[in-house]
């Protein structure tokens, strides 16, 4: 079975630009979460979506937004990029019936902002 | 405030030298504690889910245990391929969301 997939794998942007990251969950999973991981730190929660509705939001500015589609895939959008947005962006999928629920992570998208 | 602390930050072991990693937590309404392995530049790989104090899970050379305040990941006779960062996360209802709260991880290096 295919795991969580993310695209693109790597991305280079300049300050002020906009970026869209994409995620496809494991088949049968209805919930998608997004995390930001800065080098040397643990992942930080950004959003969780379940059945196209936002279920939770972390302490990130309004420049960060997300949505979930009817097929349960998801997009994370970041506007007005800052140098500090450079990080590994992780998508995790889960059944959505928790908590507790186990989340399975994708390979991540490495974003570099110059 | 919900908090997860992992120790040590880094650990170097000789092949076959058993040890334990610690994850202590302070959360409201713990619903689950999770261990992941992460290789450089990759996404975390799921290892274990623990739900209640006293629970234990095993997989190959790894064994995870849970108490009311902390969890341990025991590594028995490690091999070089066990080298990775091990992350602990908790899921709690006190924050009102289903989010995971992660520790900063323990970087494990196993020398041949």
Image (cartoon, helix red, strand yellow):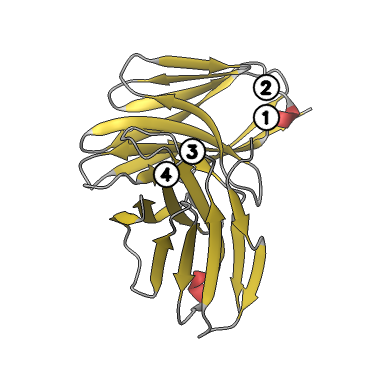
Residue A28 numbered mark, or none: 3
Q: Using residue A38 as the reference point, say whether residue B55 is left or right of it.
A: left
Between the residue at mark 2 and the residue at mark 3, the CA separation in whole angstroms equals: 35 Å
Task: Name the residue that disc number 4 marks.
Answer: A30
Between the residue at mark 1 and the residue at mark 3, the CA separation in whole angstroms equals: 31 Å
Which residue is depicted at the point 67% across and 22% down? B78
| Residue B42 percent coordinates (x, y) | 64, 48
Which residue is depicted at the point 48% across and 52% down? A71
Q: Is residue A40 visible?
A: no
Task: Name the residue that disc number 1 marks.
Answer: B82
Between the residue at mark 3 and the residue at mark 4, the CA separation in whole angstroms equals: 6 Å
Q: Using residue A87 as the reference point, say whether residue B99 is left or right of it.
A: left
| Residue B7 percent coordinates (x, y) | 46, 36
Q: Using residue A79 as the reference point, say whether residue A4 is left or right of it.
A: right
| Residues at discs 3 and 4 in contact (Cβ within 8 Å) | yes
| Residues at discs 2 and 3 in contact (Cβ within 8 Å) | no
Which residue is depicted at the point 31% across and 44% down? B98
Task: Name the residue that disc number 2 marks.
Answer: B78
Q: Quadrant of the C terminus of chain B?
A: top right
Which residue is depicted at the point 66% across and 48% down? B40
> Viewer-nearest of labels 4 and 2?
4
Q: Using residue B102 as the reference point, say whether residue A54 is left or right of it.
A: left
């Amino acid at each position: 079975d295919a795991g969580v997939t993310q695209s693109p794998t790597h991305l280079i942007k300049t300050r002020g630009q906009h970026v869209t990251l994409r995620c496809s969950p494991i088949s049968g999973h209805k919930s998608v979460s997004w995390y930001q991981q800065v080098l040397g730190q643990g992942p930080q929660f950004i959003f969780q979506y379940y059945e196209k509705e936002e279920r939770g939001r972390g302490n990130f500015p309004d420049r960060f937004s997300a949505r979930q589609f009817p097929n349960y895939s998801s997009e994370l959008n970041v506007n007005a990029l800052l140098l500090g947005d450079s990080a590994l962006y992780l998508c995790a999928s889960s059944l959505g019936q928790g908590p507790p629920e186990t989340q399975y992570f994708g390979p991540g998208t490495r974003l570099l902002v110059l | 405030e919900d908090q997860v602390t992992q120790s040590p930050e880094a650990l170097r072991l000789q092949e076959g030298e058993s040890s334990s990693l610690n994850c202590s937590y302070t959360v409201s309404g713990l619903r689950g504690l999770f261990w992941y392995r992460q290789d450089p530049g990759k996404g975390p790989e799921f290892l274990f889910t623990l739900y209640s104090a006293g629970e234990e899970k095993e997989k190959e050379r790894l064994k995870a245990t849970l108490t009311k305040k902390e969890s341990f990941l025991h590594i028995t006779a490690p091999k070089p391929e066990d080298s990775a960062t091990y992350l602990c996360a908790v899921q709690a209802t006190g924050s009102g969301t289903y989010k995971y709260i992660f520790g900063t991880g323990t970087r494990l290096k196993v020398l041949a």
